Amino acid sequence: MTIDEKYMALALEEAAKGLGKTNPNPMVGALVVKNDEIISAGFHEIYGSHHAEVNALNKAGEKAQGATIYVTLEPCSHHGKTPPCVDKIIQCGIKKCVVATLDPNPLVAGRGIKILQEAGIEVTIGVLEKEAKLLNEVFFQYIVDKNPYIFLKCAITLDGKIATKNFSSKWITNSLAREKVQYYRNKFMGIFVGTNTVLEDNPGLRCGLENGQDPYRITIDKNLKIPVTHKIISHNQDEKTIFAVHSSMVNSEKYNLLKDKYKIKFIIFSQEKISLENLFREVGKFSIDSILVEGGCEIISQVFEENLFHGGEIFLAPKILGDSNSIPFISGFNRNSIEEAINLKNISYEIYGDNIGIKFKNK
């Protein structure tokens, strides 16, 4: 590992501290180094706050003069919620800037690098670039076309079931696997489940991690069947519940009640069956950069069949239901040969005690 890689690795560790708190902005870390000594470190702590470079440079103070700054993403060059980071870098007298990867945001896209170089600052690009892009895979997906990053999660028995025939599903996986799901609920901005899942389980769809961020709760309730006593409605104090509803329900008594009293947000569709691709696109208009798809069977099947996912993890528990009437995790479409089967790509595995996580990426 080179010196630049050593310090960039530490900057990436700083960046990861912002997991779940910066969306839809990226996680960014910065390190100020002088004479092979770390002067200061900083990360983008929460959406709308100072960026990583500013936090690190504020800590460094006058010691930043003549130093090198390591940044995991190209410093911004435009006014957003905060001033351009390149201005701060120049003002502090930084001599060299080492950048992991360019920013795909069209408002930046190389302009930050150009401004630094024109100010006489030496710039190195591409140090641990692969790792930096992986850290911000959600941001890189969303910033270009505003379509959310789709991550599919499901927990299944060895015979491929997600619930018994009477919809009992607690708990298929063990506590370690369930803790990983809470990590995902913190990482991704939205969580999407089907109407039947809401009606049968009455889930809270919250993040159980300490200091974690609760996701937006998204479901399709075409005819507004979900009772107002269900948590997705009654526990909407944060105003993060979104219903996809048929246009025939607009301005109905229940629609107005949900909108005015319970502060439910709506996506309106006029088709008999909403396209999930269109739904995800509409969700993206709420500045929701990522969606954790948790099912049930119909939703999971449609996401697989229409190839809408970017990644996912299937949690496999050593349990067998053995009942043909229990609920499979996927159904509704057929392949006539093994060659036609959906073949998951970029597979990796994680062990959670006696459970196995099968991870995949669709690229």
Image (tube, rainbow, N blue to C red):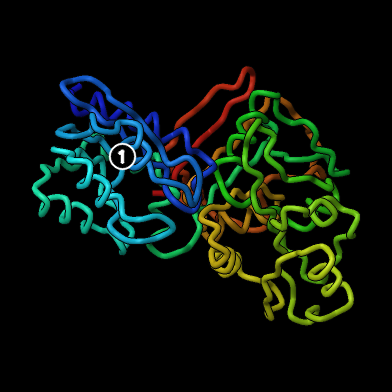
Residue 241 image offset from top left, x and y in percent:
72, 58
Closer to the camera in the image, 180 or 159 = 180
Residue sitting at x 86%, y 70%: 257
Residue 121 left/right relative to 220 = left
User: In the figure, residue 95 lies in which quadrant?
Assistant: top left
- Image: 173 above or below 142: above
Q: Is residue 19 left or right of residue 275?
A: left
Q: Position of residue 41 (x, y in %)?
A: 35, 30
Tell me which corner region of the image, top left, top right, bottom left or bottom right, holds residue 260: bottom right
Asked if residue 159 can be seen in this view, the reply is no
Residue found at x 34% / y 35%: 56
Residue 231 at what x, y percent from top left?
A: 83, 50
What amino acid does circle 1 point to? Answer: Thr
> Dot 1 lies on which element?
loop
- Can residue 329 be seen in the rendering of this structure? yes
* Mark 1 lies on residue: 72
Specify whether 83 is left or right of 89.
right
